[in-house]
Amino acid sequence: MQTWITELINHYGYFAIVALIAIENIFPPIPSEVILTFGGFLTTYTYMTPWLVILWSTAGSVIGAIVLYFLGRLLPPERWGKLLRFKPEEIAGAQDWFLRRGQASVLLCRCVPIMRSLISVPAGMTRMNMVKFLILTTIGSTIWNTLLVLLGAGAGSSWTIIVEYLGVYSWIVAAALSLAIAVFMLIICKKKLRRQSGK
């Protein structure tokens, strides 16, 4: 996949970066670290500039986030609850938590692999204010994109080393996220068993 990504950016420049980042936000397995660090590397010897790579990659991030935001709005929380077998009060609790802490979550999760894409779905589910969502998404995406593009530009031809380190970071985050989900599901299951045994 890395070769395919670098070839597209080599051929289509900024347009490829916008398209790939937008797709990466909708389909997380496409690695943004490859797109951004390679884009940064290209600024060291081509017509491309770091700030335009950051600008266009952030535009791609926002486009992808909007798609997932409206995907979250298409299915009401009650339907998500039925799919996940959550009770109405559990869904209400999750909504209440996101309404209280959603803004910080949208901002911070834009710098976390996997979550940087998925956070747009609960934002849409809870009908988070669209303007706030776009502002927070733009700020968070700009921070992440700037960091990776400048790292790629600074590393030059050694940009693949940055990708390797970021790959380790992504695996750690994925493992931590999987553990958190497992713990969360375990807690939910225990609560359901207690309620059933109490009947």
Image (cartoon, rainbow, N blue to C red):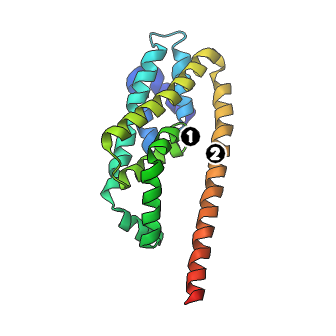
- Snapshot quadrant of residue 147: top right
Q: Residue at x 45, y 20 (%)?
A: 53
Location of residue 85 in the rendering, given as x and y in whole percent from the top left corner: 47, 72
Whole-number angstrom distance, CA of label 2 to CA of label 1:
7 Å
Q: Which residue is denoted by mark 1 in the rendering?
A: 112
Q: Is residue 94 left or right of residue 173?
A: left
Identify which residue is drawn at 45% across, 41% down. Answer: 25
Q: Residues within 10 Å of mark 2 (few under 14, many from 20)?
A: some
Task: Write down the quadrant of residue 60 in the picture.
Answer: top left
Type of the residue with mark 2: Val
Q: How many marks?
A: 2
Q: In this view of the protein, which residue sits in the foreground, 12 or 114?
A: 114
Q: Are discs 2 and 1 less than 8 Å apart at CB?
A: yes
What residue sits 33% from the left and 60% below the top? 75
Residue shown at the point (37%, 41%) measured from the top left: 133
Q: Is residue 28 visible?
A: no
- Which of the numbered marks, if any, corresponds to residue 44? none
Residue 173, numbered label: 2
Q: Measuring from the top left, give residue 199's x and y in whole percent.
A: 54, 90
Disc 2, SS: helix
Furthest residue toward bottom:
199
Q: Position of residue 55 (x, y in %)?
A: 41, 22
Quick one: 156 or 54, which is closer to the camera?
A: 54
Q: Nearer the viewer, residue 24 or 189?
A: 189
Q: Mark 2 or mark 1, which has the lower sequence index?
A: 1
The image quarter containing residue 59 is top left
| Above or below, comparing residue 174 to residue 3 in the picture | below
Q: Amino acid at mark 1?
A: Val
